[in-house]
Amino acid sequence: MCTLSLRTHPHALTMLRLLLLVLLSFYLSEGFPGAPEMMKEERQHEDEGTLQLRLEPSAFGSLWPLPQSVRLSPEVYLLCPTTFQIVHGTHSTAGPACAILQDAFRRYYEYVFSYSKWNEIPEQSSADGQLLQLEVTITEADPECDHYPRITSDESYQLIVEENVAVLNAKTVWGALRGLETFSQLINEDEFGAFQINKSEIKDFPRFAHRGILIDTSRHYLPLRTIFLNLDAMAFNKFNVLHWHIVDDQSFPYQSVFFPELSNKGAYQPYTHVYTPVDVRLVIEYARFRGIRVVPEFDTPGHTESWGKGQKDLLTPCYKENVPTGTFGPINPIVNTTYEFMAKFFQEISNAFPDAYIHLGGDEVDFSCWKTNPDIIKFMEERSFGTDYSKLESFYIQQILDIVSSVNKGYMIWQEVFDNGVKIKQDTVVEVWKGSRCNEELQNVTAAGFKTILAAPWYLDIISYGQDWQRYYKVEPLCFNGTEEQKRLVIGGEACLWGEFVDATNLTPRLWPRASAVGERLWSSKDVTQLGDAYSRLTAHRCRMVRRGIAAEPLYIGSCDHEYNGN
Amino acid sequence: MCTLSLRTHPHALTMLRLLLLVLLSFYLSEGFPGAPEMMKEERQHEDEGTLQLRLEPSAFGSLWPLPQSVRLSPEVYLLCPTTFQIVHGTHSTAGPACAILQDAFRRYYEYVFSYSKWNEIPEQSSADGQLLQLEVTITEADPECDHYPRITSDESYQLIVEENVAVLNAKTVWGALRGLETFSQLINEDEFGAFQINKSEIKDFPRFAHRGILIDTSRHYLPLRTIFLNLDAMAFNKFNVLHWHIVDDQSFPYQSVFFPELSNKGAYQPYTHVYTPVDVRLVIEYARFRGIRVVPEFDTPGHTESWGKGQKDLLTPCYKENVPTGTFGPINPIVNTTYEFMAKFFQEISNAFPDAYIHLGGDEVDFSCWKTNPDIIKFMEERSFGTDYSKLESFYIQQILDIVSSVNKGYMIWQEVFDNGVKIKQDTVVEVWKGSRCNEELQNVTAAGFKTILAAPWYLDIISYGQDWQRYYKVEPLCFNGTEEQKRLVIGGEACLWGEFVDATNLTPRLWPRASAVGERLWSSKDVTQLGDAYSRLTAHRCRMVRRGIAAEPLYIGSCDHEYNGN
């Protein structure tokens, strides 16, 4: 129990609070004030285009991504860990039976209170400026407790922190999850180990509906633990899509029920380096509890070398001077067995992954093998494709899209499929990965009336020295020329961490907090662009991630109260 | 107990062994054979100057760094974990009282046997092709069990693996430690979980005596656990110097006995972000047990901002238009109190750190503050230094060197001290950090008769996309123009991981296995330059480090039998 103590003398407390607010701001800013200003590093130059920023406290504390509307008052309330409660509001359509919320209440209680600096309960009168509970109220008739998050899910929420009771209102559980994260970011520990929160009012919603992280489990296998940790980190940054690039040329770790030989032969190892059906369900459920969709990518007809090991005749045999070389190219698009296989395979996938979308890839198809194969050459002639192999690619893709449509799934595709003029459904999401900022591809895709997401400027596997988060942060997805209607078709973006040089040893520090910059760009208002303020908030946010067990790397010199000690 | 089984049928076993040797080579090579050859990555281009290498088994298995002389025979012996022993040779001058060896025997037994693939003891006749024990014999009268390693320590060893008994001979414990690492690298687990080793003969010694890793605990504090893990990794790569850049502008985590205010005021936090005297001794002892020297760096007169917080009047007050600005520059070189402080401080340091050398820094001194200070201007006039502030720097450094000499320590310095013509002792080691490969600095330093170590091409904090280990590997430290005598003065090099962007979250994967490339360059023969062979061995060596708990990042696509699961 938290009880009355010396510190509750009214005037002393008020003064102390103001002082603490200032001190706290510095504390949150990682490192001691003034350090960076004297720094001179001839040894190592920052990348061009990134700034040497000064750490100054942000008026918005450590909020990340910044909510759409924030009002913080200097008035401060204390929270007592032993009595503070997170409860369902009286008029909430959700209650204790709502597992998503129950789990989130427990999780956020732990994030806030489990890391007390001095492991000691601060003493405080319960009558003076305390916050006793957070009431979470879901207002829609269906709170969606048992749903999966969707592209159309409503993530908006409203949070009002006043004396005694804070109120979090959201239409559905998805908004409540985002609001709980924000609530947890408002609570700070002062120097005496007391938990405090400012009086505040927050109205929030995402700027973009699709905010994704791409992980690649083919170039390197990622243990479930690594995936779970990064789903946690995604929730801390309000990301809502795990784009799971699950298989590729190098390995096929997805354990198929219908075609077990795919992973038996195509995984790096058929037992230790696979995702069983249970693993897949665990990932999807872990993600669902954090309001995160799981969109698997089965990239064809290129990027499929590993498929060929366990599925005979699926890949195109390459020839040299009319003799098979023994090597194989992309999926063989001219045989019926290919489409029989794909129909059955995507039937399974559509059941295994509940999301309304499957990513079908379609990027980087190398025509050189197709060009050597006499059967394919004959097929091209018969169909009057001439020597335009992109027509053959389109022929293949078209059938795959039809197969996936027939199992009632929408699809995402890489931009080449659109570029090659394949006929795609109206609800298709085209992912743009080529070109520079404000490029014409977004313009073209949206002019054709398709939804699109931007990945091109956010290939986080491409590392460089210095504060490259700034580059990611400065991207404005809607800077291309286009009508308002076109711009509404840009539904979001993704930070992509391809796996050539990434596995469980370095994924987390390579992804975080660099992806956080993308997270704020996709969530916060367009005019949230002040780098210095972002630096301050992100520095504190990074320390918070570290405290919550995420090995997020430092932005620059400084320290966290709780340094990472996990590896 | 390991007992007779089906597998011991003589002919079957011989054939099986040959097959296993081949299979094993592939296994060790991380990933399945053939994968890289088909890979096509338009998305991500390797850095210029690095090659896309094919993974092919090395004739030298997973040895890293490659010993000076290796003879591996196809004959294979099995090891039985329950009965295998590492023992002191009958004629060894060291015995069970030699703590360094006892600890190393236990450690290497664990490295070899603790990670059995199937956690099952393979069955095998004890009469047929088994290796029963490793005998370690120290030949010098003083095995140096209770010494600290020195720059002159003899690290050579000879290892002969024959049926029943393997023999490791070394003059001192330091060579035995290196030989034990090599022995452990010769042992592989086959597909049945059996431990095996080839008949072999190895004669080995380092090419360079000083093989260092620089860590920086000022820009970010590193927990002891991180330092210990990296001392482990250093031993796996036969590094022998921890260059501990312990304090700098940003923070002063070294807890001084004479001047406790230095860390009380200058550390990021005076309790959680400091190295106590006990911590320092633990690091030194942990390093000693692995044959690693600990050379602390106390860099002055620049890089000292954090010193000023806890030691009044140590730094130079800066002026603007003859008025003090309240900011401070380098150490104040014109007041006696500075030298009184330094004398007492280095007295303490010389006791706290047993190594014969202290690194005194001396790099990157910014004269701008000195130039504003009227007292310093006056001092310059009195000494007839004109406006040449490097003379003032030399004046300061000279006194510091004399102080350190008076406490019977040698010193290492950054190249500027030499460049500025400061009078340095004959045993000084000049560390070269500027310039490109084959630069003139090594030529100049050695022409003046001084020992030198090379760091310039190995600033590992400068990251880039792709296989940059190749760049580090291709450096030839002696490619400058100079006599044989000059080249003998190049006693080694260091891989430097400055801490601006590095803390406990990312230090290990950023350092390993990139530093391993430097490790082989400094240990192995000059003619060990075959990149493809290095790639194969290093890939396997990296997986071994992961298995031993080091979060060493992947070189490229592929997998390890035991993926990292620690964070």
Image: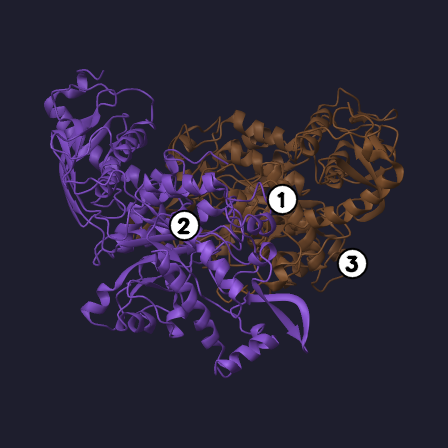
Chain colours: A brown, B purple
Residues at marks 2 and 1, CA–CA distance in whole angstroms: 57 Å
Quarter of the image containing the N terminus of chain A?
top right
Q: Quadrant of residue A244?
A: top right
The residue at which mark 3 appears reads as A484
- SS of the residue at dot 3? helix
- SS of the residue at dot 2? helix
2 and 1 marks in contact (CB < 8 Å): no
- Looking at the rendered image, the disc whose residue lies closer to the viewer, 1 or 3, is 1
- Looking at the rendered image, the disc whose residue lies closer to the viewer, 2 or 1, is 1
The residue at which mark 1 appears reads as A543
State the image coordinates of residue B393 (x, y, percent, origin top left): 47, 72
Can residue A509 be seen here? The reply is yes
Q: Which tag, 3 or 2, sits closer to the chain's start?
A: 2
Q: Which tag, 2 or 1, sits closer to the chain's start?
A: 2
The crowding category of the residue bearing disc 2, from other C-alpha atoms within 10 Å (few below 14, some 14 to 19, many at least 20), is: many
State the image coordinates of residue A14 (x, y, percent, origin top left): 86, 42
Residues at marks 3 and 2, CA–CA distance in whole angstroms: 44 Å
Residue B131 in the image: above or below residue A214: above
Of B88 and A134, nearer the camera is B88
On the picture, is B304 further left or further right than B133? right
The label shown at residue A376 is: 2
State the image coordinates of residue B355 (x, y, percent, origin top left): 34, 50
Query: Identity of the amino acid at label 2?
Result: Ile
In percent of the image, x 84 and y 34: which residue is there? A8
Residue B387 in the image: above or below residue A76: below
On the picture, is B360 further left or further right than B371? left
Q: Quadrant of residue B314?
A: bottom right
- Looking at the rendered image, the disc whose residue lies closer to the viewer, 3 or 2, is 3
- The chain carrying label 1 is A
- The chain carrying label 2 is A
Query: Identity of the amino acid at label 1?
Result: Cys
